[in-house]
Amino acid sequence: MERLSVWAPDGLPEIRPGDDLGDLLAGLLAGLDEHDRPRDGDVVVVTSKIVSKAEGRVVAAADREQAITDETVRVVARRERPGLPPLRIVENKLGLVMAAAGVDASNTPEGTVLLLPVDPDASARRIRAALARRLGVRLGVVVTDTAGRPWRDALVDIAIGCAGITPTDDLRGSADSHGRRLDVTVTAVVDEIAAATELVRGKSTGRAVAVVRGMDRHVTDDDGPGARVLVRGSADDLFREGSAEAYARGLADGRADAAADS
Amino acid sequence: MERLSVWAPDGLPEIRPGDDLGDLLAGLLAGLDEHDRPRDGDVVVVTSKIVSKAEGRVVAAADREQAITDETVRVVARRERPGLPPLRIVENKLGLVMAAAGVDASNTPEGTVLLLPVDPDASARRIRAALARRLGVRLGVVVTDTAGRPWRDALVDIAIGCAGITPTDDLRGSADSHGRRLDVTVTAVVDEIAAATELVRGKSTGRAVAVVRGMDRHVTDDDGPGARVLVRGSADDLFREGSAEAYARGLADGRADAAADS
């Protein structure tokens, strides 16, 4: 019987710019009861929020809209909202398509907002190395963020960084229970791990770290490709622009075509 | 410390049209070791595949493209693929936007495909009632399917039906650790539960059921609204049409406008 266990220890202090996050995590995890202490093959999952805090990715809140603009590589969709700044769905510097570019204004000190880590895969690698050094175990590390979905309400956590774990479980070419090839089944393992840990971390509790046991088969000796590989390339993206944006561009081009023809 | 445990028992027989799925599940779960047997507050998660099989939602594979057409309420995006039928992202009768309308050709007998359950929330309610009757416990039930995401490669499981569990964890109005209101944090609890269980169910193993312990606070006395509430309404959907489709419609309208003006 396959089993998965997830637990979210309390007790991580408030993270401040310049903190050695790997060191703080190692201290917290080393202090757990023996059964809960990470073992070879476990996965340690941390929110991007604490990674960003440790990496000093804090900016003044007066600049929230400017921060979103600065983090934006490409605007995908935009909608005006009465009494609020416009909703902006954008591709950010990490290739992630997110509302507000992933700029976060909750669980941060009043007057500040938090940007995503510059390179969450690199952050995951650093945390993994620190935990291996301090705890002497071979772990996977996942860095999470919270994301919306275009066609579903409410949010789920996804993996924006990882190290020491295969981001996907590629079953293409393997057989299903009827012996037919599974053609399109590539599972986003690290996204599912991120989602599972959100259920025990919660949003308002300050639990920013979780341990996952039972995913040994996905944990690797090397750091691996990181979660960046889960970003879909533009050639395969059928939703590069919001419907309204694409329609407006078509309308303008159609009118210009017709003008050029006449 | 918050804890979540997930396990996926082996031993469910191949499901056939007309099988009483609640009865088969109850038999399997009642036979587990005492610690693994579902208790009050646990969540039982089943794939839509076995629900569809029990409900006889099987059609001949020769009709796969026709089955997709029949399940389609609205085409969202379409792309030609050399040597393959076109990729169709559509809204199906359940309001779900999915590739191929959720029509499934894996893990089914050669020559057949499987449609999604007619009403997965109703399926979840029936399973919940059967498990309550047979096992005498108050459970949540989630029915899963596997879905793509427009901007991320690889697939994750989501909840397409549920009963006895709150689909979302609505934190709007609650305070973060700095005492600021969490404005937009509504978590898709049942989607995260679906994702967590996929990690132990796998795709090619035939394990189609999982038990989740630790989500008691989301399990309810009544059946609740079901997973249908997670479908985003059209007024809030910025991606009603693929970019190419919206652009083409704009282009045609722009040319027609210009023609009308001249």
Image: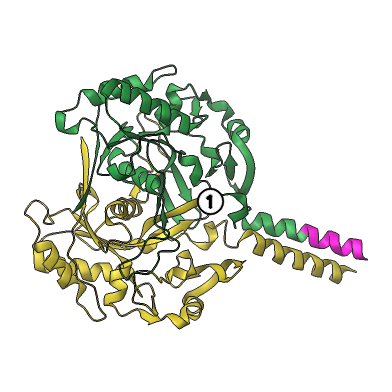
Chain colours: A green, B yellow
x then y, percent, for residue A241:
63, 53
Q: Nearer the viewer, residue B1 or B50?
A: B50
- As shown in the figure, which amino acid type bears the numbered disc 1? Trp
Q: Residue furthest left?
A: B34
Q: Name the image quarter holding the N terminus of chain A.
A: bottom left
Q: Nearer the viewer, residue A122 or B23?
A: A122
The answer to whether residue A55 of the structure is visible from this angle is yes
Q: Nearer the viewer, residue A217 or B43?
A: A217
Q: Is residue B237 left or right of residue A134?
A: right
Q: Name the image quarter holding the C terminus of chain A.
A: bottom right
x then y, percent, for residue B259:
86, 70
Residue denoted by label 1: B151
The answer to whether residue B178 of the structure is visible from this angle is no
Q: Is residue B43 left or right of residue A63?
A: left
**Residue range of the region highlighted in magenta in the rendering:** A252-262
Q: Residue at x 10, y 58 (%)?
A: B32
Classify 10 Å Cα crowding around label 1: few (below 14), some (14-19), many (20 and above).
many
x then y, percent, for residue A49:
42, 31
Q: For the residue labelled by badge 1, is the local secondary structure a helix, a strand or a loop?
A: loop
Is B222 placed above or below B173 here?
below
Q: Residue furthest right?
A: A262
Q: Quadrant of residue B122?
A: bottom left
Q: Residue at x 15, y 33 (%)?
A: A35
Q: Quadrant of residue A86?
A: top right
